[in-house]
Amino acid sequence: MTRALHVTVREKSFAGTNGAPRIVLRDIDFRVELGEFIAIVGPSGAGKTTLLKIVAGLDSTFAGSVRLAGAAITATPIGFVFQEPRLLPWRTVFENIALVLPRHADRSVVTRLLGEIGLADFAETLPPQLSLGMARRVALARALVVEPELLLMDEPFVSLDRPTAERLRVLLLTLWRARPCGIIFVTHDLREAVELADRILLFSAAPGRLVADIAVPLARDRRADAAAIDTACAAITLRQGRAACS
Amino acid sequence: MTASALDRATAPRSTTIVVGIGLRAASFALFLTIWEIAAHWAGAKTLPPIEAVVAALLDELMSGELLHHLGVTLARVFAAFVVAMAVGGALGLAMARWRVFDLLLDGWVVLLLNLPALVIAVLAYVWFGLTEAAAIGAVAVNKVPLVAMTMREGGRSLSRELSEMASVFRLSRWRRFRHVVAPQLVPFLLVATRSGLSLIWKIVLVVELLGRSDGVGFKLQLYFQLFDVPHILAYALAFAAIVQAIEWGLLQPLERRVGRWRR
């Protein structure tokens, strides 16, 4: 039996400008099997990033719990790919990835990963000299080098041109197949979610609520089947009663 | 890469270096020319010509006096600098990190920042006697608020995004400080170092002039009483040369090294 992550957020709020609390998340309750790829889709301001931070342990001021197989998540290796690459500009690509490894870990794994993401020749390059697409690949490698049981991704391919984003999606699936782990992938792009995920959690506008938990009715290697993806998008959109899939 | 390609790659850099040295030499020559003209115009008693100052410099150098007093002053500068950077740095970072520290110490920092160096030096000698510790302490106290203010700004400007990254990947405290925090503080540390040294040089001389029996400040006071302008200028120039050497030989290369990722 695979281990599962259980996330419950009864309520999460921030202090509003007028002093009154502004609720960003409410009545969230879902499970993710480790090995499963789920996407969270919702409009801007639905609290998707906040939810990822709660799962990652970056925010503990909420009513609810994050448990992995019934225990706290603190001992579980987690990978996180932020919206921006968040690389250290004063460290080389290699050093940025190796930084998150335990002190005496075998560093050859970094070289191997650099090869897999197609940046073997850029090991000694500093991040400011990389394109955004390359920096995003490095951020992905950094998240995977810790061999995470859970990988959290916050709109990792946003603001990339379409071909680059497409290549990165393919790379992500390839790397995930080689290193199965639970993935929570936040996006506002329903089509991207359908292309990648096993399940889609649909969030409402602020305050974000979980309004639907939908299993994607497509086999893996679905990327080439544009018509099937379109149909799935249309079905989900119809179910939501809104035209979000363009 | 072929030899000719290498030449092409290195040519602009060597040209830049040559132009840089040339401009600095021209600037120095201009300084000497203005000095000579001014010396002629003002008279040797007020502003001695260059050769008189060089003679005084050689005289002090040969007798061993110059090196002794320069060494004593530099040791005081170094001691006061280390104390001021350590105390000011720790206070500044604590003020950036904890609001309560900021509220408690902000008034003190502003008060010390605006208190004349001379007042602190005089009070230190009155309260603690004409001792080495009082002299170094007085200089350090003058500098601490400036370092604290600079490092507080550095602490406040630390990237929250990188801090989150370090947290999510569970970097140890030491790794987080060494790889994430310290490199962000380096520019502020360099500003504090440069402004600190330039301030400390000046205050150390005042403190020596007031209450020490050795050091460049003491010698300047001695030659002032004798109205010996060539010797005053000889000590001032020797001191300025050392400061310049530290600037060119230590601070600027250090700045280039730590800031190379920005290029």
Image (cartoon, rainbow, N blue to C red):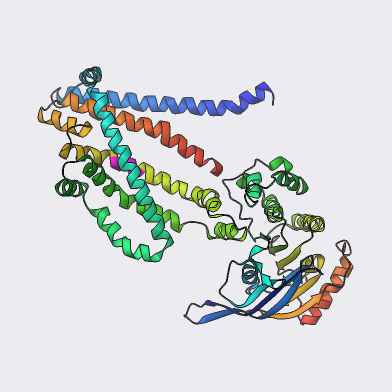
Q: Look at 41% across and 27% down and name the residue there.
A: B23
Q: Look at 42% across and 31% down and name the residue there.
A: B249
- Quadrant location of the C terminus of chain B in the rendered image: top right
Q: Look at 21% across and 44% down and name the residue there.
A: B134
Judge left or right: residue A127 versus residue A191.
left
Relative vertical location of residue B170 with respect to residue A18 in this rendering, above or below? above
Relative vertical location of residue B12 with respect to residue A2 in this rendering, above or below? above
* Residue A203 visible at all: no
- The residue closer to the viewer here, B85 or B193, is B85
Judge left or right: residue A111 versus residue B151.
right
In the figure, residue A234 lies in which quadrant?
bottom right
Q: Percent from the top left, x then y, of residue A20? A: 49, 82
Image: magenta residue range: B195-200
* Residue A236 visible at all: yes
- In magenta stretch: residue A179: no
Relative vertical location of residue A60 with respect to residue B111 in this rendering, above or below? below
Q: Percent from the top left, x then y, of residue A204? A: 69, 79
- The residue closer to the viewer here, B133 or B197, is B133
Mainly helix, strand or loop, the magenta region? helix
- In magenta stretch: residue B197: yes
Judge left or right: residue A179 versus residue A227.
left
Q: Percent from the top left, x then y, of residue B163? A: 55, 58
Q: Total of numbered circles in the picture?
A: 0
In the figure, residue A222 lies in which quadrant?
bottom right
- The residue closer to the viewer here, A22 or A68, is A68
- Quadrant location of the N terminus of chain B in the rendered image: top right
Q: Percent from the top left, x then y, of residue A209? A: 67, 80
In the figure, residue A71 lies in which quadrant?
bottom right
Judge left or right: residue A160 versus residue B173.
right
